[in-house]
Amino acid sequence: MSRMTAAQRSWVSRAGAMLGLLLAMFALLLGPASPASAHAVLVSSSPVADAVLPSAPTEVVLTFSEGVRNVPDKIRVLAPDGARVDRGEPVFDGAVVTIPVDPGGPRGTYLVSYRVISADSHPVAGGYTYSVGAPSSPPTDTENDTVDPAITAAVAVGKYLGYAGLVLLVGPVLVLSLLWPQRLDRRGPARLVWTGFGLVTAATLIGIWLQVPYTTGGGLFSISGSALSDVLASTFGAVLLVRLGILVAAAILLRPVLRGNAGRADHILLAVLGVAGLFTWPLAGHSAASPVPAVSVLVDAVHVGSMAVWLGGLLMLVAFLLRRADERELGAILPIWSRWAAVAVSALLLAGVVQALIEVATPSALIDTTYGRLIIAKVVLFGLVIGVAAYSRRLVQRRLATEQPGRMRRAVWTELGVTALILAISAVLVQTPPGRTAEANDGAAGAGFFSTTLTSNLLSVEVEVDPAGTGSNSIHLYAYTADNKPQPVVEWTGTAALPSKGVEPIEIPLLPLTDNHATGEINLPTAGEWQLRFTVRISDIDQATVTATVPIN
């Protein structure tokens, strides 16, 4: 009896250590308690930031690096006196947002303030100024709330709880279905499974609730019915509602599986639901906004599923099988589990590499971005886990695991401890802008733009080139009369040439946006003093040609 008491005390102490480690992971998640950076990037705007226009525009155009979604009443254009000059609802067309503006505002500096939702469900907030006539003191937007740091931390903790619940749910169910000896009691593993089920359900409900203040700004209870409806109508909300439906169906099938009297059809249906449920994680995160979403969603689902199988199986080993199964049973179970673990770890590693290549994109992003550095930390810890897993596999191959289960338990506890850290890093990663986006953001922030006003005897043309660097550039043209009123234009044509390097004129496709505003995109592959030439026809017989020299860096 005393030996059983000692074993129980050992188990309680180790369970306490694991609980302490999990609490430490929560502390790690709460560490970066600043608003999460947005995962879409404002790559261009019209008017461009800090531009001085001869007259007020009729619209403001924002172009992001990926498609964005509206947050009601969170896009504003403020006049120098603080009055709103945006008129009607902004128009969303994928990554382009067009904001109608009253052109009758006063002279001075205007503020464009925006909050939208990126394709991966994260908020994108920011603002910039432009001036009409001459700069003045800029207005302040006091109504556009920022994300409460507590909300950001709570979102990360909720994601961690979801991952932890997935581990407690997937791996134990798999072991109970295929490896559990019939003579052993199932009540302990069943409690573990229902705990995981509860964590996943709670994390999903918490995720839906927190998404409202996370996207609109405000505190934990700054939630309205319309805002909640907007979240549920979004892709993020729809995916989480699907997850809840899958959980309800799975709850019915889990009961016979946990009792040990499930049929073949029950196991197949539960497996189908499990695979479908795994796909809800990438569909509600970064992978949905990846440059190759189909590949990213697939590898992310494999990554999450492999993690849940591996860690959940390890937990079943250390918590139950290595303590309860006899030597004969362990001799049959451990070789099979060892092969499963090898497959799961291989899939985890391969999926993680593919995922990192897509999200980091460049070697510099691996070093220079927070996302890249977190990936490095994850790889280092994963290498440590692989070493411990190889040690465990040798114990199994040499049959020492059954003869000396204490050594096996210590190795598995080490694996679980290190992978708990990896799990925390993963929860932080999904709240961190991917390397490709962060690097693009840095590039956009560091890029400049070119703006000038060209005059002729008929009209003046304001020319904006953004970012005035090699590669793709956006060009915006505005035509004005001699007294700075918008000049209707019948036809726009333009060319770009680099005579110093023998580049002949290249046609610039120009698209009229309003009567006096046209835009175009052109790739300028080489740095130098580019000659941009525009012909503006304002009637059947009247036209003017103007030329600008634009330094491209």
Image (spheres, helix red, strand yellow):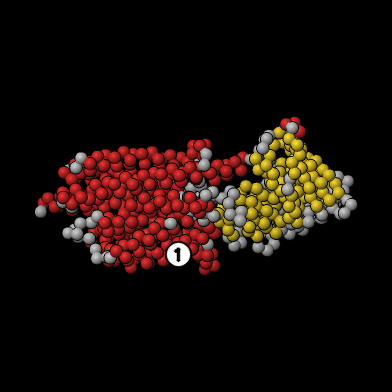
In which quadrant is the C terminus drawn? top right
The residue type indicated by label 1 comes to: Leu
Direction front: furthest residue: 264
When asked about the image quadrant of residue 392, the answer is top left
| Of the pair 121 and 17, the residue shown nearer to us | 121
The answer to whether residue 108 of the structure is visible from this angle is no
In which quadrant is the N terminus drawn? bottom left
When asked about the image quadrant of residue 166, the answer is bottom left
Q: Position of residue 468 (x, y in %)?
A: 68, 40
Q: Which residue sits at x=26%, y=61%?
A: 190
Q: Which residue sits at x=52%, y=49%?
A: 292
Which residue corresponds to mark 1? 241
Q: Position of residue 526 (x, y in %)?
A: 68, 35
Q: Position of residue 263 (x, y in %)?
A: 28, 65
Please tell me how crowded label 1 is: few (under 14), some (14-19), or many (20+) other residues with Cα within 10 Å: some
Left or right of residue 421, residue 215 in this image: right
Secondary structure category for the residue under label 1 = helix
| Of the pair 345 and 199, the residue shown nearer to us | 345
| Of the pair 268 and 18, the residue shown nearer to us | 268
Direction top: furthest residue: 500
Q: Which residue sits at x=17%, y=43%?
A: 404
